[in-house]
Amino acid sequence: MRTRPDIISKEIIDGRTVSRDEAGYLIDSEEWNKAVAVHFAKEEGIVLQQEHFTIIEFMRGYLDERGVTADARFVYRFLAERHNESQSRARLRFFKMFPYGYVKQTCKIAGMRQPRAFSTG
């Protein structure tokens, strides 16, 4: 369910104020940094490791280059190529790192706006 754009909260993370929608996604992806990622991941019960940041950096680079958030299948393809494995194996790897999924956890931790509709792969 898409959140209402008029419900915005402000929060101070690592000395910076960030604005979030009612589901906890950043309003402006430019407010994201690694401290924000760590904070959001902690809320989701995830301790970020280098592999998490590799995925997040891929997603943010995709957004910077194309102006849209990468669909989950592109992330799975990226992981498959990185680990020289099938996309189905990469998808399993992904869900071990982000057990509640692409939109619920990965997009939020990476500082993306909440997607309207999304393929979860």
Image: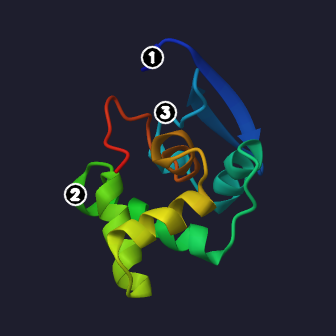
Q: Earlier in the sequence, mark 1 or mark 2?
A: 1
Q: Earlier in the sequence, mark 1 or mark 3?
A: 1
Q: Secondary structure at mark 3?
A: loop
Q: CA distance from mark 3 to mark 2?
A: 18 Å
Q: Secondary structure at mark 2?
A: helix
Please determine whether, in this image, residue 4 is positioned above or below residue 109.
above
Q: Nearer the viewer, residue 8 or 115?
A: 115
Q: Which residue is mark 2?
A: 66
* Residue 23 found in image quarter: top right
Which numbered tag is attached to residue 94? none
- Which color mode does the image show? rainbow
Residue at left offset 34%, top offset 70%:
87
| Cβ atoms at labels 1 and 2 below 8 Å apart | no
Which numbered tag is attached to residue 27? 3
Residue 82 in the image, given as x and y percentages of width and height: 41, 84
Residue 78 in the image, given as x and y percentages of width and height: 35, 73
Residue at left offset 59%, top offset 67%:
52
Seen as rendered, the residue at the extreme left is: 66
Q: Which residue is mark 1?
A: 5
Q: How many marks?
A: 3
